[in-house]
Image: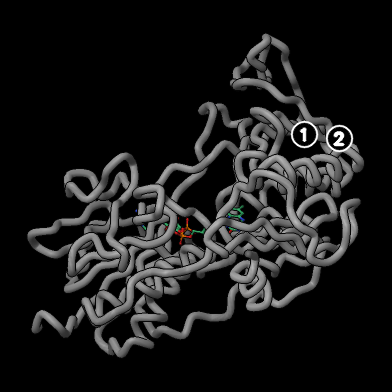
Amino acid sequence: MSAGTPARIVVVGNGIAGLTAADTLREAGFDGELTIVGDEPHPAYSRPALSKALLLDGDDVSSHELPPACHGATERLGVRASGLLLDRRLVTLDDGSALPYDRVVLATGSRARRLSDLPEELTLRGLDDALLLRSRLAGRPSVVVVGGGPLGMEIASACLASGCRVTLVSQGLPLTGRLGPYLAGVFVKAALDLGLTVIETGSARLERRGGSARVVLDDGAVLTAEILVTAVGDIPNTEWLAGTGLTAEGAVPVDSRGLVRPDIAAVGDLAALPTPNGLRRLPFWNSAIEQAKVAARALVRGDDAPPLRFQPYFWTEQFGLSLKAVGHLPLEGEPTYVDGEPGGGPALLRWSHDDGTGVAVALNYRIPIPRLRRAAQAAA
Ligand SMILES: Cc1cc2nc3c(=O)[nH]c(=O)nc-3n(C[C@H](O)[C@H](O)[C@H](O)COP(=O)(O)OP(=O)(O)OC[C@H]3O[C@@H](n4cnc5c(N)ncnc54)[C@H](O)[C@@H]3O)c2cc1C
């Protein structure tokens, strides 16, 4: 193998970042031996669908499916990578085998952070979690959701739509940290109108008392329900990289092309990339896709490949509202209504920055994403 022409590439992680990296490697001309390792038994699927259509769509359990992969890689599914031996260029697997590589893509994503080790604590990260929650909702149980971010709110929305009585526990006003106070206010009003009970607290913990699990708030108040779900953040899956020196502060730092070093890329939820605010994880679907495209090209083409430049794109669907946003969130201050008006109808909103760019937000508003991107650029 010459330095410029890898013969064997291993992608570790079969989520959207790993899948996109594999597809892009092929598009970039890599025709050597490609192997994808994924510890879930399922083919790659849409994770965002798990807290949206998959929990809601009656008998339809297909909303998470992605088109069949066409990268022609050897797929090792249901197998976990247990280590990376840098000096021997080997990925070791928990079935005792090992995969040699010339280049490797680290794409093992993250997992749900838990508040306890109680089996009653449900989280939503993978397809199996979503199918379990979906089946439990059929009995219309009472539900407490801990976590007022987009995921906690989407779960609460789906539980409410399934006919459950739902209480959401949030540190401060739900969604404020992600969206900013203006948009958070719009969503929380919609949630309250539909019957969600919101409790703002400092921190909550889970404990078992008298044989059943319960949520204890910082003022000592206790909440019980038939289902307890937490959505309190994620933890990158970096344990298998122990001893490599590739991790820092729980993530894998990369350069502007997604490379850790010339033969190793890290993409998606486990990577910390350069941003105007320093090295940060951007654990979102489109970010994973864009990172993976750039890094895969860089693995094949080196410095000739362009660095990452993208406008962040985020969306959520909950409580009868759909939001699509291009640009950096959260947002401070009041928006300009480009179309529509305050009060709940379809609207296109803008927040402007001093440099002439801005953030465009479509609220229940049908607009093609390229137009939304242009609206963000034109937000001066
Ligand atoms: C329920 C839910 C809803 C979401 N909704 C949105 C949304 O609306 N908008 C948005 O922008 N983002 C959303 N996100 C975030 C988005 O889905 C993630 O940012 C994205 O899926 C990250 O992709 P990834 O490939 O980096 O990681 P993952 O999707 O986590 O994939 C990593 C894969 O690697 C596997 N793996 C882990 N360790 C190993 C190992 N040692 N060996 C082999 N395989 C391993 C994991 O099991 C997993 O299959 C949501 C996330 C969740 C959980």
Horizontal and vertical percent position of residue 160: 84, 43
- Give left or right: position of 304 versus 207: left
Q: Secondary structure at mark 2?
A: loop
Q: Which residue is mark 2?
A: 165
Q: Amino acid at mark 2?
A: Arg
Instruction: Name the residue rendered at 90%, 43% in the picture.
Output: 194
Reading the image, the residue beneath label 1 is 143
Asked whether 181 or 282 is in front, the reply is: 181
Judging depth in this view, the residue of 176 and 211 nearest the camera is 176
Determine whether label 1 and label 2 are within 8 Å by CB. Answer: yes
Seen in the picture, residue 245 relative to 351 is either above or below; the reply is above
Can residue 359 be seen by looking at this rendering? yes
Q: Is residue 101 left or right of residue 36?
A: left
Q: Residue 87 location, x and y as percent? A: 8, 59
Given the image, on which type of amino acid does mark 1 rest?
Val
Residue depicted at x 71% and y 29%: 169
Identify the disc placed on residue 122. none
